[in-house]
Image (spheres, rainbow, N blue to C red):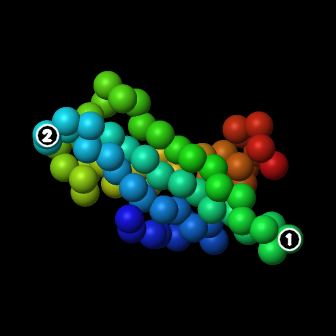
Amino acid sequence: MRTRTYRDHRVELDAEEIRKGEWVARATIVIVEHSKAKRIPIFGRRRATLDTERQADAYGFELAKLWIDGKLWGSNGHG
Protein backbone atom coordinates (compact mmCIF):
# COMPACT_ATOMS: atom_id res chain seq x y z
CA MET A 1 0.00 0.00 0.00
CA ARG A 2 1.29 3.44 -0.94
CA THR A 3 0.45 6.64 0.87
CA ARG A 4 0.25 10.12 -0.63
CA THR A 5 -0.88 13.49 0.67
CA TYR A 6 -3.21 15.94 -1.03
CA ARG A 7 -4.27 19.25 0.55
CA ASP A 8 -3.26 18.03 4.01
CA HIS A 9 -5.28 14.81 3.66
CA ARG A 10 -3.59 11.41 3.78
CA VAL A 11 -4.60 9.09 0.94
CA GLU A 12 -3.82 5.39 1.17
CA LEU A 13 -3.73 3.68 -2.23
CA ASP A 14 -4.54 -0.02 -2.34
CA ALA A 15 -5.49 -1.16 -5.84
CA GLU A 16 -6.93 -4.65 -6.10
CA GLU A 17 -6.23 -7.20 -8.82
CA ILE A 18 -9.60 -8.86 -9.49
CA ARG A 19 -8.33 -11.05 -12.34
CA LYS A 20 -4.92 -11.54 -13.91
CA GLY A 21 -3.97 -8.16 -15.39
CA GLU A 22 -7.23 -6.45 -14.32
CA TRP A 23 -6.88 -3.91 -11.53
CA VAL A 24 -9.52 -1.74 -9.87
CA ALA A 25 -8.86 1.45 -7.96
CA ARG A 26 -9.20 1.52 -4.18
CA ALA A 27 -8.17 4.36 -1.93
CA THR A 28 -8.86 5.48 1.61
CA ILE A 29 -8.87 9.09 2.73
CA VAL A 30 -7.74 9.45 6.33
CA ILE A 31 -8.91 12.56 8.17
CA VAL A 32 -7.75 13.15 11.73
CA GLU A 33 -10.22 15.18 13.79
CA HIS A 34 -9.94 15.60 17.57
CA SER A 35 -7.17 12.97 17.72
CA LYS A 36 -9.39 10.37 16.03
CA ALA A 37 -8.80 9.02 12.55
CA LYS A 38 -11.82 8.93 10.25
CA ARG A 39 -11.43 6.66 7.20
CA ILE A 40 -13.39 7.29 4.01
CA PRO A 41 -13.16 4.50 1.41
CA ILE A 42 -13.03 5.47 -2.26
CA PHE A 43 -13.63 2.82 -4.92
CA GLY A 44 -13.31 2.90 -8.67
CA ARG A 45 -15.97 1.23 -10.79
CA ARG A 46 -15.60 -2.53 -10.98
CA ARG A 47 -16.12 -2.42 -14.72
CA ALA A 48 -13.38 0.19 -15.12
CA THR A 49 -10.39 -2.12 -14.84
CA LEU A 50 -6.87 -0.99 -15.56
CA ASP A 51 -3.89 -2.95 -16.81
CA THR A 52 -1.50 -2.31 -13.93
CA GLU A 53 -1.52 -1.66 -10.19
CA ARG A 54 0.26 1.66 -10.82
CA GLN A 55 -2.51 2.84 -13.20
CA ALA A 56 -5.21 1.78 -10.72
CA ASP A 57 -3.45 3.59 -7.86
CA ALA A 58 -3.14 6.73 -10.00
CA TYR A 59 -6.86 6.56 -10.82
CA GLY A 60 -7.71 5.99 -7.15
CA PHE A 61 -5.65 9.05 -6.22
CA GLU A 62 -7.52 11.15 -8.80
CA LEU A 63 -10.85 9.97 -7.36
CA ALA A 64 -9.66 10.81 -3.85
CA LYS A 65 -8.54 14.27 -4.98
CA LEU A 66 -12.01 14.92 -6.42
CA TRP A 67 -13.61 13.90 -3.12
CA ILE A 68 -11.21 16.09 -1.12
CA ASP A 69 -11.76 19.09 -3.39
CA GLY A 70 -15.52 18.62 -3.05
CA LYS A 71 -15.20 18.48 0.74
CA LEU A 72 -13.07 21.61 0.88
CA TRP A 73 -15.29 23.52 -1.57
CA GLY A 74 -18.54 22.18 -0.07
CA SER A 75 -19.76 20.61 -3.29
CA ASN A 76 -20.08 16.96 -2.23
CA GLY A 77 -22.37 17.31 0.76
CA HIS A 78 -19.53 17.19 3.29
CA GLY A 79 -18.20 20.17 5.13
Kindly check if marks 2 and 1 are in contact, taking CB atoms under 8 A apart as contact: no
User: Is residue 33 rendered to the left or right of residue 8?
Assistant: right
Give the numbered dot on residue 4.
none
* Image position, residue 19 (x, y; %): 19, 36
Seen from the viewer's position, the closer of residues 60 and 75 is 60
Q: Residue at x 47, y 52 (%)?
A: 27
Q: Quadrant of the N terminus?
A: bottom left
Q: Position of residue 10 (x, y in %)?
A: 57, 67
- Identify which residue is drawn at 39% across, 68% down: 2
Q: Return the residue nearer the eye: 50 or 20.
A: 20
> Which type of secondary structure does the marked residue at label 2 adopt?
loop
Horizontal side of 31 relative to 45 (left or right) equals right
Which residue does the image show at 78% across and 68% down from the upper left? 36
Q: Residue farthest to the bottom?
A: 35
Q: Is residue 59 visible?
A: no
According to the picture, the residue beneath numbered tag 2 turns out to be 20
Amino acid at pointer 2: Lys
Front: mark 2 or 1: 2
Viewer can see residue 37: yes
> Rounded to the nearest whole Å, what is the CA distance between mark 2 and mark 1?
42 Å
Q: Amino acid at mark 1?
A: His
Q: How many marks?
A: 2
What residue is shown with label 1? 34
Whether 29 is drawn above or below 22: the answer is below
Residue occupying the point 32% across, 25% down:
47
| Quadrant assignment, res 77 | top right
Q: Position of residue 64 (x, y in %)?
A: 52, 51
Dot 1: what SS? loop
